[in-house]
Image (cartoon, rainbow, N blue to C red):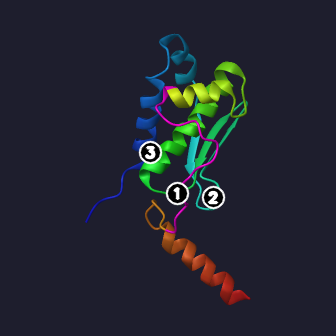
Amino acid sequence: MKSLPDWTQKVRAWREKYEAMIAPEWRGSLEKQIIVFEFDPKMTATAGQYRGHLTHSIKLSPWMQEREAEETFAHEYAHFCAYLLYGEIEHGFFWRSFMTCFGHTAEVTHRFPLGTRCILVGIDAKLAEAEEKKEAEK
């Protein structure tokens, strides 16, 4: 039986991978920042979300494959870099530049369907139980 990856380690590795692609003079500013990361099972239409100002957070939908999760992380991490280094909050020039630097296409929306199989252990069953409970209460 194939074991599922430790997502904390995966996300840390993705961040380190993308930080290493950024010029050293900027890297220090990024490395000092704490990013709160989470998979949010309620995200069934959006693949990811970055929020930043005083604190920084990246949320990803767990309803995608690992390759898609990394691509979405890169998208949101590019938002973090563009905001922190240049004050850009949209899908502008700096965001596109970071996406290119990270080796991904600078697309605003994902082109993959969010699936019905969750990449987190046990989430499928818990959500199914919650849905059944809601239906039973009606």
Towards the viewer: 132 or 110: 110
Q: Quadrant of the C terminus?
A: bottom right
**At which x and y percent is residue 118?**
48, 64
Residue indicated by mark 1: 62
Of the numbered discs 1 and 3, the one sitting upstream in the chain is: 3
Q: For marks 2 and 3, give the one nearer the viewer.
A: 2
- Amino acid type, callout 2: Met
Residue indicated by mark 3: 8
Q: Quadrant of the N terminus?
A: bottom left
Q: Is residue 46 above or below residue 70?
A: below
Structural crowding at the residue carrying mark 1, measured as other residues with C-alpha within 10 Å and reported as few (<14), some (14–19) or many (≥20): many
Q: Is residue 132 above or below residue 22?
A: below
**At which x and y percent is residue 121?**
43, 63
User: Do labels 2 and 1 touch, CB within 8 Å?
Assistant: yes
Residues shaded magenta? 101-116
Label 2 to label 1, Cα distance in Å?
8 Å
Q: Residue at x 40, y 36 (%)?
A: 13
Label 1 to label 3, Cα distance in Å?
13 Å
User: Can you tell which quarter of the image residue 93 is in?
Assistant: top right
Residue indicated by mark 2: 43
Q: Main secondary structure of the magenta part?
A: loop
**At which x and y percent is residue 30?**
56, 23
Of the numbered discs 2 and 3, the one sitting upstream in the chain is: 3
- Amino acid type, callout 3: Thr
Q: Is residue 85 above or below residue 45?
A: above
Label 2 to label 3, Cα distance in Å?
19 Å
